């Protein structure tokens, strides 16, 4: 599943580092958790160590439970559900999967199907049900891809009947990797808020969300975005309850016979790895939307950028293309501090005055 700060905890998709760190006082608790095949970094400020560690322990237990429920290829509730779909049977599902399914169905509609967790069979076909990259298994044949396209599985084929699920299309195989980190982050935030923690930064698999500010005195957290062509592209300040999520073709990929890089994000319209976008980023106060939308933008490529940000009601989004060009919204342009200047591909898209979740979003 589908990294961070001044004390760098890895540089996968993004890095974060608080401004004015040398001026901070008060307790700081940092923890690194291993879940979803990647690292979750947590930093809590302004809370005594025992209280912070108890909150992190609860969050860790939740993450491990979600991995047992959501894992797309190791034995889990999700693999049990997918087996029932293949057999044409209805199946009981835990509340967390039902909640993920409801949100995913909404985003499948608003993204015109570019984000669709019903394509787990295609993910498996391309060899991306793995934690080892680059993928070296045989590339699927055109006939295999065509057969998958013929079945046209979608998360919208799944119906929810109380605590049970049924798919009218047996080819549907659910894979929530493209939204799991956002959903898990939202649950971590809920745990921290319930426990009275006011200032924290959560990095799950390279995606970031802030609670409060960086020092309890108005100093913001700062999140940096990795440049798909090397180094850092830039940084953005995060306010309370803001999430910065990125997707890219540079970490999880396989190589084509001609040496081209095929990223793990697939285009459900073609059954092929998405092309055109090298990296995307979304800034919004909903980590689940940010996660889903960054994937949809990758799948849609440059031609779909303006349409997707408007349909998904994204005030702040950007894309760096495979030609090293930049597509960006006006509100994101106002927030992002670039370390270099990619060539602008057209004018900034006016899709909202700020980065907050827009009415009706």
Image (cartoon, rainbow, N blue to C red):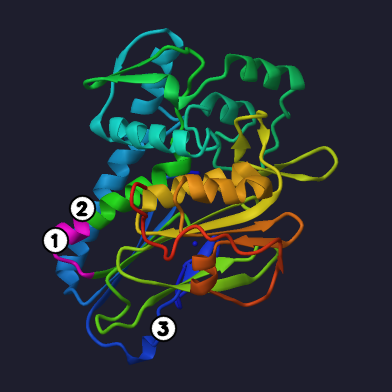
- The residue most toward the top is 88
Callouts 1 and 3 close, C-beta under 8 Å: no
Report x, y in % for residue 83: 42, 16
- The residue most toward the right is 258
Q: Which quadrant of the figure has residue 194? A: bottom left
The residue under label 3 is 19
Determine if the magenta segment contains residue 294. no
Q: Which quadrant of the figure has residue 233? A: bottom right
- Of residues 250 and 284, the one drawn nearer to the viewer in this rendering: 284
Q: Which quadrant of the figure has residue 163? A: top left
- Of residues 306 and 5, the one drawn nearer to the viewer in this rendering: 306
Report x, y in % for residue 57: 22, 56
The residue under label 1 is 195
Q: Is residue 46 visible?
A: yes
* Bounds of the magenta segment: 191-198
- Of residues 47 and 143, the one drawn nearer to the viewer in this rendering: 143
Determine the secondary structure under disc 2: helix
Report x, y in % for residue 317: 52, 59
Q: Vertical placement of 242 versus 158: above or below?
A: below
Q: Say whether disc 2 or disc 1 marks the residue closer to the N-terminus.
A: 2
Callouts 2 and 1 close, C-beta under 8 Å: yes
127 horizontally vs 24: left or right = right
- The total of numbered circles placed on residues is 3
């Amino acid at each position: 599943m589908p990294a961070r700060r001044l004390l760098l905890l890895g540089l996968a998709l993004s890095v974060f580092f608080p401004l004015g760190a040398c001026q901070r006082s008060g307790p700081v608790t940092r923890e690194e958790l291993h879940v979803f095949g990647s690292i979750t970094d947590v930093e809590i400020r302004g809370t005594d160590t025992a209280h912070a560690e108890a909150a992190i322990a609860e969050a860790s237990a939740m993450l491990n439970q979600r991995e047992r429920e959501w894992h797309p290829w190791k034995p889990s509730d999700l693999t049990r559900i997918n087996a029932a779909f293949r057999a044409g049977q209805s199946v009981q599902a835990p509340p967390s999967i039902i909640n993920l399914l409801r949100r995913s169905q909404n985003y499948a509609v608003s993204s015109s199907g570019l984000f669709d967790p019903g394509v787990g069979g295609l993910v498996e076909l391309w060899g991306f049900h793995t934690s080892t990259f680059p993928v070296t298994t045989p590339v699927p044949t055109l006939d295999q891809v065509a057969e998958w396209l013929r079945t046209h599985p979608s998360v919208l084929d799944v119906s929810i009947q109380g605590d049970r699920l049924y798919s009218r299309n047996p080819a549907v195989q659910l894979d929530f990797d493209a939204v799991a980190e956002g959903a898990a982050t939202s649950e971590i935030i809920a745990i921290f808020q319930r426990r009275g923690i006011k200032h924290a930064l959560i990095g799950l698999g390279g995606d970031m969300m802030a609670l409060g500010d960086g020092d309890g005195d108005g100093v913001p957290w700062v999140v940096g975005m990795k440049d798909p062509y090397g180094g850092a592209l830039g940084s953005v300040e995060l306010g309370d309850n803001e999430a910065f999520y990125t997707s890219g073709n540079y970490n999880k990929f396989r190589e084509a016979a001609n040496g081209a890089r095929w990223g793990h994000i697939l285009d459900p319209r073609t059954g092929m790895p998405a092309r055109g976008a090298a990296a995307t980023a979304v800034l919004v106060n909903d980590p689940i939307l940010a996660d889903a939308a960054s994937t949809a933008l990758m799948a849609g490529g440059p031609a779909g950028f303006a349409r997707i940000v408007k349909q998904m009601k994204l005030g702040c989004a950007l894309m760096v293309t495979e030609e090293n060009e930049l597509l960006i919204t006006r509100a994101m342009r106002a927030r992002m501090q670039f370390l270099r200047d990619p060539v602008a591909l057209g004018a900034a898209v006016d899709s909202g005055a700020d980065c907050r979740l827009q009415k009706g979003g």
